[in-house]
Amino acid sequence: MFRILLASAAMAVVLASPTFAQADLTDPQIAHIAYTAGELDIASAEQALRKSTNPEVTEFAETMVRDHRAVNEQALSLLEKLGVEPQDNATSAALSEAAEAKLEELEALEGEAFDAAYVANEVAFHQTVNEALEATLIPSAENAELKALLESGLTLFGEHQMHAEHLAATFK
Amino acid sequence: MSSGRLLSALLAGLVLLASPALAEEYVIVIDAMKFAAPPDGLKENDVIVWRNEDIFRHTATDRGGSFDIDLEPGAEARLTLAATGTFEVYCRYHPGMTLDLVVEP
């Protein structure tokens, strides 16, 4: 439990940090952050698909893999078209680090304990990413197409968050 | 118009008028995580073409279990409305996406 708190706290710190709050993120950095968030959620879903036997949880995880892949493929083709190379940055690195810790922590759980923790983390993760998209990434994006893609990402992730919240309610 | 053509046009009109109400076909587009608004005045035996123009896979699923249509991005599928009533449609992958179809006799 302590480690769960620690990972959530780390994530909160990352997103509240000046790096993230700064409005001077460049488009290549914004693209990298959004892409990384998608990849992290896919990794988390793949862990759930390996560990969970709950059909609702596995179906949710399959949707996460499929949807985030679709957005990221779209992002890659947009970046290619724009000739933009996504640029690694402190926020992406910190997000990856927090997610790594979370994967390790969830790996130790089994059965319903795993399912509940995975779904709770999905709620928290999507909430964090959605807040970041809304408050920082979308307003900071300069390219109109990138901005539009981030906006459709926000619509999708908002749905994912709601879906995760409904699932989470079944574990209480 | 020659009288022969006029006659056949009139006959065709009569045939149309005499036939039972023709089934209509409606397209419901799914895009940007939303079902388009449902058509008004749906009747039994009308056909809905579900067209997924989104980049995500979706379903058009009746909560009552009478249909469950799975649509890959870019896919479309036809559904004949075989019964009357209100059908609560949602996407199994994105349960926040919903649509009510009202089908009248």
Image (cartoon, rainbow, N blue to C red):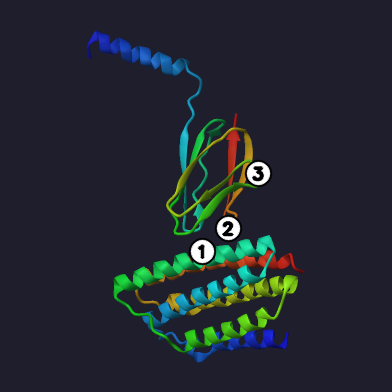
Where is A29 relative to B86, above or below? Answer: below
Task: Identify the mark nearer the N-term, 3 or 2.
Answer: 3
Q: Which residue is mark 3?
A: B65
The image quadrant where one finds the C terminus of chain A is bottom right
Residue A30 location in percent, x, y?
42, 80
- Mark 3 — on which chain does it sit? B
User: Residue B3's quadrant in the figure?
Assistant: top left
Tell if the residue under mark 3 belongs to the same chain as the one under mark 2.
Answer: yes
Answer few, some or many: residues within 10 Å of disc 3's Cα (few below 14, many 20 plus, some between 14 and 19): few
Q: CA distance from mark 3 to mark 1?
A: 24 Å
Q: Which residue is mark 1?
A: A66
CB contact under 8 Å: marks 1 and 2: yes
Residue positioned most to the left? B2
Q: Amino acid at mark 3?
A: Gly
- Mark 1 — on which chain does it sit? A
Q: CA distance from mark 1 to mark 2?
A: 10 Å
User: Residue B55's quadrant in the figure?
Assistant: bottom left
| Residue at the spot 62% in from the left edge and 76% down from the top edge | A124
Q: Indicate the secondary structure of the residue bearing disc 1.
A: helix
Q: Which residue is mark 2?
A: B93
Q: CA distance from mark 3 to mark 2?
A: 16 Å
Residue B42 location in percent, x, y?
54, 35
